[in-house]
């Protein structure tokens, strides 16, 4: 006889644990599946302070507090944004994730570790049959609704009958012994260094940092080469950096984030910031929409596709324009040569302009910043912007 819950959430990362806890707190019998247990995520661990409005960030999980971002453009120009107070935290992801998982369990969530979703089928109007597998055997779980919060999951999307991601990029990262200011994130933009991407140095202590990059391909090779360039090599204390790890990231959201008996949220849905590929904050915002939709479906005793489609409308109203404008900027940025990037930095960094740009900077919201930046670049005749300003990136 299949085990039965009202809602099953697959994936116990920050978004999955948040969604599961939110449902359990509403009296919904909820199970949380996790296939891997306690693994180290490949993530910068940067979380904007606005995230605290949605989930607690325990002090013991915080490695550093960020108040400045230093942007190096093609090793020729530098732009610095500083905030009077903390704009973001760098957290230990294992500790942070564990804190949210424990909060979910304390809320009454049934935590099932070592279970992987293999198949699913829908029996209308409100039953989804989930075949899960652990180390020993396959089992069946019945629920009114399955919520996928598994991270990048092309195989599961295919099994669910959903269309896949509109492309991917490689996120590559390592940790090194490196002297740095614990309040500053360093970002390097140069197509000569990282083609169609960028590199970061994120402090986790005075003498240790996460160094990584995002690029369409060959990310491991590019990072290895970057670590041997003078701007990093002379600062790295250890001769052999820690293991370099890589994962694929969605380049944008999937076309439909719902199906019969199914919602997809967070990175699994491609709900990442188009500019930085950060996913926690946007995933939590979309998680709130998923919870609201799930409660509606449970009250109606229907989890058919037409009922669940409201989720797509809700999350697109919340972050859709941000994703579209971010993708537009990303497409423009990827088309720029280093010389054009330097010219853009000169324009943005010109007298009075950067201060105006600073006035609309928000760590997790980039639409207004992009709009203002593009208007200045167009006004000053940067040709690549004039050719692209009227277009829309998908």
Image: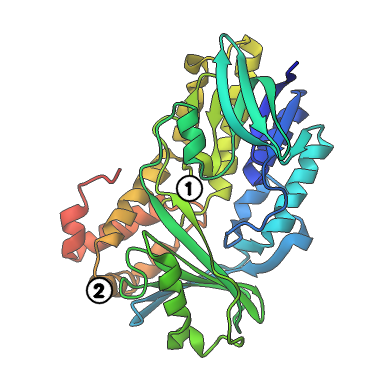
Residue drawn at x 20%, y 47% is: 390
Image coordinates for residue 326, horizontal then vertical, percent: 38, 50
Comparing marks 2 and 1, which lies closer to the viewer? Answer: 1
Q: Which residue is mark 1?
A: 272
User: Sequence-wise, which precedes: disc 2 or disc 1?
Assistant: 1
Alpha-carbon span between mark 2 and mark 1:
28 Å
- Say whether residue 332 is visible: yes
Q: Residues within 10 Å of mark 2 (few under 14, many from 20)?
A: some
Determine which quarter of the picture holds residue 136: top right
The one nearer the camera, 377 or 294, is 294
Q: Is residue 129 above or below residue 390?
A: above
**The residue tagged with tag 1: helix, strand or loop?**
loop
**The residue tagged with tag 2: helix, strand or loop?**
helix
Q: Is residue 169 above or below residue 285?
A: below
Residue drawn at x 67%, y 50% is: 52
Residue drawn at x 53%, y 67% is: 173
């Amino acid at each position: 006889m299949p085990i039965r819950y009202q809602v099953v959430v697959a994936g116990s990362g920050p978004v999955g644990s948040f969604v599961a806890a939110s449902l359990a707190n509403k009296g919904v019998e909820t199970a949380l599946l996790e296939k891997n247990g306690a693994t180290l995520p490949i993530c910068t661990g940067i979380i904007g302070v606005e995230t605290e409005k949605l989930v607690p960030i325990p002090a013991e999980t915080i490695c550093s507090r960020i108040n400045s971002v230093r942007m190096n453009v093609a090793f020729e120009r530098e732009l610095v944004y500083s905030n009077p107070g903390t704009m973001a935290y760098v957290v230990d992801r294992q500790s942070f994730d564990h804190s949210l998982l424990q909060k979910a369990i304390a809320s009454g969530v049934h935590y099932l570790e070592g279970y992987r979703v293999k198949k699913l089928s829908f029996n209308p109007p409100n039953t989804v049959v989930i075949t899960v597998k652990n180390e020993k055997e396959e089992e069946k779980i019945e629920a009114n609704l399955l919520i996928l919060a598994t991270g990048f999951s092309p195989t599961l999307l295919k099994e669910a009958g959903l269309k896949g991601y509109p492309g991917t990029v490689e996120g590559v990262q390592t940790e090194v012994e490196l002297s740095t200011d614990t309040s500053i994130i360093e970002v390097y933009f140069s197509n000569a260094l990282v083609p169609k991407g960028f590199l970061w140095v994120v402090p986790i202590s005075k003498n240790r940092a996460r160094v990584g990059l995002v690029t369409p391909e060959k990310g491991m090779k590019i990072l290895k080469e970057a670590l041997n360039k003078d701007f990093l090599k002379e600062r790295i204390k250890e001769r052999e950096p820690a293991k370099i790890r890589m994962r694929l990231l969605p380049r944008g959201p999937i076309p439909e984030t719902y199906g019969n008996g199914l919602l997809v949220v967070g990175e699994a849905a491609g709900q990442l910031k188009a500019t930085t590929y950060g996913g926690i904050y946007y995933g939590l915002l979309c998680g709130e929409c998923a919870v609201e939709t799930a409660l509606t479906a449970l009250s109606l005793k229907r989890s058919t596709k037409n009922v669940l489609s409201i989720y797509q409308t809700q999350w697109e109203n919340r972050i859709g324009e941000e994703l579209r404008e971010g993708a537009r900027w990303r497409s423009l940025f990827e088309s720029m040569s280093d010389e054009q990037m330097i010219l853009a930095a000169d324009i943005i960094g010109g007298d009075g302009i950067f201060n105006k740009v600073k006035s609309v900077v928000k760590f997790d919201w980039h639409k207004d910043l992009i709009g203002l930046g593009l208007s200045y670049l167009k006004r000053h005749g940067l040709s690549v912007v004039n050719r692209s300003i009227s277009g829309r990136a998908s």
